[in-house]
């Protein structure tokens, strides 16, 4: 349909921000480079361009190939819950049109991708955070897995020395991705250092630093929700220096803490003390690194550890909480050596040991949804159930005549664990008229997923129902078995679902080899490479060609053409979710004469979900690129014009032969992405009394994307549907009609400057998203409008939201950073940095729900840093 729901962009030539350029400015690479898809930003850029969250991934939002906004069906409620504020998981981004879990994230060249992936197929969380469960109270979401992220390490921005992004024309050195490659470079200790150095930072925020707005369709707040109340602080310290003449060490620690008070739903407010419930989150990051200078090279050992815990509690359910934990350890032994062969060759070898554990602990294996108030009318007679049996923790709001539900229980216990052992080795050097690169590696992974099992009680029968069904002939109350806590005189549970426990373990190995050469003859440069991959789960041999040619007819003008293939590396993700989700249904009834409730009778036995199947091919993206690089002699700036075309083949998707409960993984999915980017950059060295450096970076982007399924795990197992244009879709299948993560036209702005001999640093970045036609939730349900919505032959009208066309306005978002050195203590600077996100306080394209009516506008963060 050509409708676009969120923005996608692309980048141009190598962007290098070094110490000789303005802080945070962008500088394009030399004309004639093969790396037209590489972008780098140094530590000062990271400081200037990251947002107020402290997440290193947020710097990617300032780059034009990276999409993070989403005004689509997935974002039908952009209202902020306190959960969202203290969720310290890294930002999920799409790069060059790929899924958000199809990128390769690395720390110092070693993968930190999460083995289990970012999403759980048995819930509709889609990475939006556990607050999704609060907004739906869906039993389907209660058994989902929360706290998942595409990155195992939660890298704090304060420790990042440089960020590399490869979004196209990626070297054969990199594999196991379909989107982009992101490498966070953290400082390594220097064996030549003669003294210790370090830095300490501290920042604080609370809800008083943010502007909130009501963004419901009608601008009202019918449930009387108060603004989110929260507080956050970040602290970090790092130090490195010599231990002996040939050994140096580095130690670093970062803590991000967030606490919040959540306003309980009105039925749980039985006294003053029950109106709000507190909870908190902590994300700790530890780093230890030791380098030793050897006679024939350098040896480095490093350990990075993330320990994050979110003590989540619900505001829509009584005494329901989940401790969401993530522990990830990365150990790397790195050896560098120059070899005196073939005219000089450099060798780099790495050994690695990684461990990750994601846990959800609730301590309770039952989930109940009680109906305490209900009205039923038949033949002019109204029957009412108004139970006082739950009054100590839940009651019907004064004056309410709507059905009132009270939720209690827990979600059981779940865990995802994986251990990875591996190694890589690489040679590079000069060859003929250029260079060569040769390398390979292996990994062994053991991953497991466990679940304690769960009983859910969600369907009730009240005395009002019984009176309605018997035309008033019911004796007035139910008779329950002694000790049955699922039955009372006013209401009992008539159906029950028992979800099986499971313990799934997967073992798999992966091997890869790559070779590449870059040769240059006068005005022609060619980079050609091959990458081969094999893993024991899919048992496919994949060969990915990488080719880039560059013609430079003049010193200030070059034309670059590329053709590349990128294979997915998510093979473990599907294996670990396989064979989960089996359940058995039970039902029971009552005697209409006596009111006696009968025993449970077993019903349907549903087999576990199946995501594995034989003869699967590895998904891949084929890429064609064209770029023009031009050094403008008139303005002194650099221009880059780039076209990118990607076609996703053999994408994992739910097979067309699947049934409602038997999801078979297939290669029937596909995707398509095109973009055109025009970029300009210019730096000035201005020797005035006040201003010293000024940098400008501009980019205009057009993009479009289509994808056959929003998630490789189809959502037909979910209990939410969308009706649009006369058809009914799952939320995943809806993306086939609308496309996603793709706003047609966008403009990026970046301005940086240095003043007062470097003591004052100013930065301004912004996005202009031009108006477009998209689709969003109308706020109505199908059954309310009399629409009969069917899916797979079943009537799902009561579970279906109606979507409509919507014209999104042009939107300008500006972010500002001010840094100032306020003092020097014995030559060591103390800096204050002020960050302002959404400077113009614009929330015009956001829409929220009655449950979460508040959206955040302008936000301020203040940071102090002492360097020594």
Image (cartoon, grey):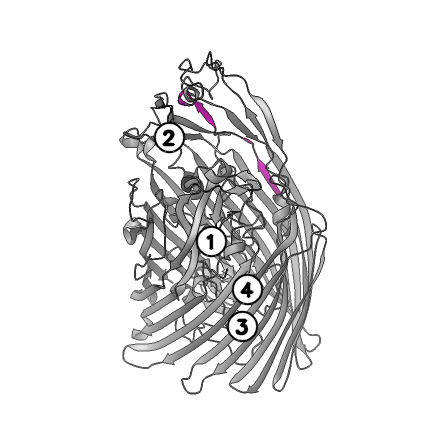
Instruction: Kindly state the secondary structure of the residue where label 2 is placed.
Output: loop
Labels 1 and 2: the sequence-earlier one: 1
**Structural crowding at the residue carrying mark 4, measured as other residues with C-alpha within 10 Å and reported as few (<14), some (14–19) or many (≥20):** many
Read off the magenta span: 447-464
Q: Nearer the viewer, mark 4 or mark 2?
A: 2
210 to the left or right of 371: left
Q: CA distance from mark 3 to mark 2?
A: 56 Å
Compared to residue 248, the image places residue 80 above or below, namely above
- Tell me the distance, in whole angstroms, between the alpha carbons under discs 1 and 4: 25 Å
First reached walking from the N terminus: tag 3 or tag 2: 2
Q: Quadrant of residue 122?
A: top right
Residue at the spot x=49%, y=34% of the render? 411
Q: Can I make out residue 649 in this image?
A: yes
Q: Quadrant of the C terminus?
A: bottom left
Disc 1/disc 2 C-alpha distance (Å): 39 Å
Q: Which residue is mark 2?
A: 403
- Secondary element type, mark 1: loop
Query: Is residue 830 in the magenta section?
Result: no
How far apart are the two marked residues, 3 and 4, measured between alpha carbons? 11 Å
SS assignment for the magenta stretch, majority: strand
Q: Name the spot of residue 119 as percent of width and height, x first.
A: 53, 48
Q: Which residue is mark 4?
A: 673
Q: Residue lying farthest top?
A: 594
Residue located beneath label 3 in the image: 643
Q: Count the marks.
A: 4
Instruction: Give the residue drawn at x 59%, y 56%.
Output: 332
């Amino acid at each position: 349909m050509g409708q676009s729901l969120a923005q996608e962009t692309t980048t141009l030539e190598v962007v290098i921000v070094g110490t000789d350029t303005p802080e945070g400015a962008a500088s394009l690479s030399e004309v004639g480079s093969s790396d037209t898809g590489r972008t780098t930003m140094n530590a000062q850029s990271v400081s200037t361009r990251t947002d107020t969250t402290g997440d290193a991934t947020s710097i990617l939002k300032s780059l034009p190939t990276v999409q993070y906004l989403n005004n689509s069906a997935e974002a039908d409620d952009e209202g902020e819950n306190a959960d969202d504020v203290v969720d310290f998981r890294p930002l999920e981004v799409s790069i060059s049109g790929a899924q958000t879990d199809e990128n390769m994230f690395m720390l110092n060249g070693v993968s930190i991708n999460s083995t289990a992936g970012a999403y759980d197929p048995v819930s509709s969380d889609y990475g939006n955070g556990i607050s999704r469960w609060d907004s739906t109270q869906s039993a389907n979401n209660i058994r989902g897995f929360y706290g998942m992220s595409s990155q195992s390490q939660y890298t704090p921005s304060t420790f990042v020395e440089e960020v590399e992004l490869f979004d196209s024309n990626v070297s054969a050195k990199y594999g196991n991705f379909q989107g982009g490659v992101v490498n966070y470079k953290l400082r390594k200790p220097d064996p030549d250092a003669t003294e210790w150095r370090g830095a300490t930072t501290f920042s604080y925020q609370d809800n008083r630093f943010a502007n909130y707005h009501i963004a419901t369709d009608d601008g009202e707040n019918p449930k009387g929700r108060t603004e989110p109340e929260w507080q956050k602080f970040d602290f970090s310290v790092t130090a490195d220096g010599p231990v002996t003449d040939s050994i140096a060490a580095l130690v670093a620690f970062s803590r991000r803490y967030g606490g919040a008070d959540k306003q309980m739903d009105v039925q749980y407010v039985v006294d003053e003390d029950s109106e709000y419930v507190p909870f908190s989150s902590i994300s700790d990051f530890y780093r230890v690194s030791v380098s030793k200078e050897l006679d024939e090279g350098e040896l480095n050992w490093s350990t990075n550890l993330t320990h994050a815990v979110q003590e989540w509690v619900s505001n829509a359910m009584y005494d329901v909480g989940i401790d969401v934990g993530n522990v990830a350890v990365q150990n790397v032994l790195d050896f560098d050596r120059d070899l005196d062969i073939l005219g000089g060759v450099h060798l780099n070898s790495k050994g690695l040991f990684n461990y990750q554990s994601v846990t959800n602990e609730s301590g309770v294996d039952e989930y109940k949804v009680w109906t305490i108030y209900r009205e039923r009318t038949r033949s002019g007679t109204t029957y009412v159930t108004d139970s006082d049996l739950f009054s100590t923790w839940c009651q019907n709001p004064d004056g309410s005549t709507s059905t009132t539900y009270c939720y209690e229980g827990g979600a059981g216990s779940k865990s995802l664990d994986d251990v990875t052992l591996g190694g890589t080795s690489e040679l590079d050097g000069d060859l003929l008229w250029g260079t060569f690169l040769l390398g390979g590696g292996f990994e062994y992974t053991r991953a497991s997923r466990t679940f304690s099992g769960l009983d859910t009680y969600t369907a009730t029968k009240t005395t009002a129902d019984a009176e309605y069904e018997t035309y008033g002939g019911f004796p007035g109350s139910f008779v329950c078995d002694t000790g049955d806590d699922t039955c009372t005189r006013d209401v009992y549970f008539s159906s029950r679902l028992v979800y099986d426990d499971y313990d799934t373990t997967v073992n798999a190995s992966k091997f890869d080899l790559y070779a590449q050469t870059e040769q240059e003859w006068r005005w022609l440069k060619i980079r050609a490479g091959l990458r081969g991959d094999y893993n024991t789960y899919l048992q496919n041999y994949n060969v990915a060609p990488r080719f880039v040619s560059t013609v430079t007819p003049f010193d200030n003008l070059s034309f670059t053409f590329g053709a590349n293939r990128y294979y997915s590396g998510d093979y473990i993700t599907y294996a670990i979710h396989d064979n989960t989700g089996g359940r058995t249904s039970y039902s029971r009834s009552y005697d209409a004469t006596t009111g006696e409730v009968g025993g449970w009778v077993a019903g349907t036995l549903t087999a576990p979900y199946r995501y594995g199947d034989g003869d699967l091919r590895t998904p891949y993206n084929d890429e064609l690129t064209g770029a023009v690089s031009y050094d403008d002699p008139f303005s002194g700036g650099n221009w880059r014009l780039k076209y990118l075309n990607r076609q996703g083949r053999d994408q994992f998707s739910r097979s067309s032969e699947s049934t409602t409960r038997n999801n078979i993984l297939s290669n029937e999915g596909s995707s398509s992405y095109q973009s055109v980017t025009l970029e300009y950059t210019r730096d000035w060295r201005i020797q005035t009394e006040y201003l010293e450096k000024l940098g400008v970076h501009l980019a205009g982007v057009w993009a479009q994307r289509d994808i056959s399924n929003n998630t490789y795990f189809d959502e037909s197992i979910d209990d939410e549907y969308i009706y649009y244009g006369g058809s009914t879709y799952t939320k995943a299948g809806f993306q086939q009609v609308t496309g996603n993560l793709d706003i047609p036209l966008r403009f990026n702005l970046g301005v940086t400057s240095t003043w007062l001999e470097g003591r004052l640093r100013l930065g301004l970045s912004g996005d202009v998203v031009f108006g477009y036609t998209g689709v969003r939730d109308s706020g109505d349900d199908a059954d309310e409008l009399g629409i009969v919505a069917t899916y797979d032959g079943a009537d799902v009208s009561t579970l279906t939201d109606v979507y409509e066309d919507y014209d999104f306005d042009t939107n300008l978002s500006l972010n500002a950073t001010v840094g100032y050195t306020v003092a020097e203590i014995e030559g060591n600077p103390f800096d204050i940095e002020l960050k302002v996100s959404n400077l113009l306080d614009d929330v015009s394209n956001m829409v929220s729900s009655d449950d979460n009516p508040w959206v955040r506008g302008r936000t301020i963060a203040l940071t102090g840093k002492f360097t020594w």
